[in-house]
Image (cartoon, helix red, strand yellow):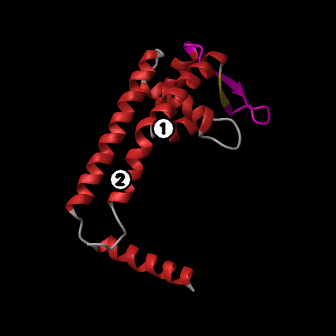
Amino acid sequence: MVPARKAQRSKVTTSARRGGTMRDSDYAALAHFRYQIRSFLAFSEAGSAGQGLTPTQHQALLGIKGFVRPGPATVGDVAKFLLIRHHSAVELINRLEKQGLVSRVADPEDARRVHLKLTKKGEQKLQALSRQNIEELRRAASPALSRLLKSFGEPGEA
């Protein structure tokens, strides 16, 4: 019987929160959270520069490696992942290919499709950056996110 009450309470408080008044503490928590996001992005961008990459190039490598499942990534997938136009993604992939970080591989089932694959050099750069970023998230972001969520309290509380 307790789980039903809990589920009912969640429904009521969630709907009350949607139209409810924002508290000053809500604004403060959101401001702090946005600061944490920007701090992480600045950290990640500095790491990208340290590896000779732009933040967008780093994000593209990450998208190629981890965004698309099942199957290999395509230029269209990279465009979607980065929220850019297809022709912009083509130019980005061209630059990554010139740096020896990405290779294009024809789809064996459909020659019109081209798959993207990280080269060994691309894998190494992405792995180094990803390790740094994960460590930074463990160090700084996790406690901040936990505090943020707790600061909002229960939906519907005044």
Locate the N terminus by quadrant.
bottom right
Task: Please report whichever mark, 1 or 2, sits nearer to the chain's N-terminal start.
Answer: 1
Nearer to me, 32 or 120: 32
In this picture, residue 143 sits left or right of residue 99: left
Residue 125 got which mark? none
Q: Which residues are magenta?
A: 98-114
- Relative image position of residue 9 (x, y in whole percent): 44, 80
Q: Which residue is mark 1?
A: 138
Residue 27 to residue 80: above or below: below
Nearer to me, 108 or 132: 132
Asked whether residue 95 is in view, the answer is yes
- Element type at mark 1: helix
Would you say residue 99 sits in the magenta stretch? yes
Question: Which three-letter amino acid code belongs to the residue tagged 2?
Answer: Leu
- Relative image position of residue 85 (x, y in whole percent): 46, 37
In this picture, residue 62 sits left or right of residue 43: right
In this picture, residue 124 sits left or right of residue 46: right
Question: Which three-letter amino acid code belongs to the residue tagged 1?
Answer: Arg
Quadrant assignment, res 99: top right
Asked whether residue 102 is in view, the answer is no
- Element type at mark 2: helix
Q: Residue at x 58, y 17 (%)?
A: 97
Nearer to me, 61 or 88: 61
- Report the residue that reaches farthest toward the left: 24
- Relative image position of residue 7 (x, y in whole percent): 51, 78
Would you say residue 22 sits in the magenta stretch? no
C-alpha span from label 1 to label 2: 15 Å
Q: Which residue is mark 2?
A: 148
Quadrant assignment, res 156: bottom left
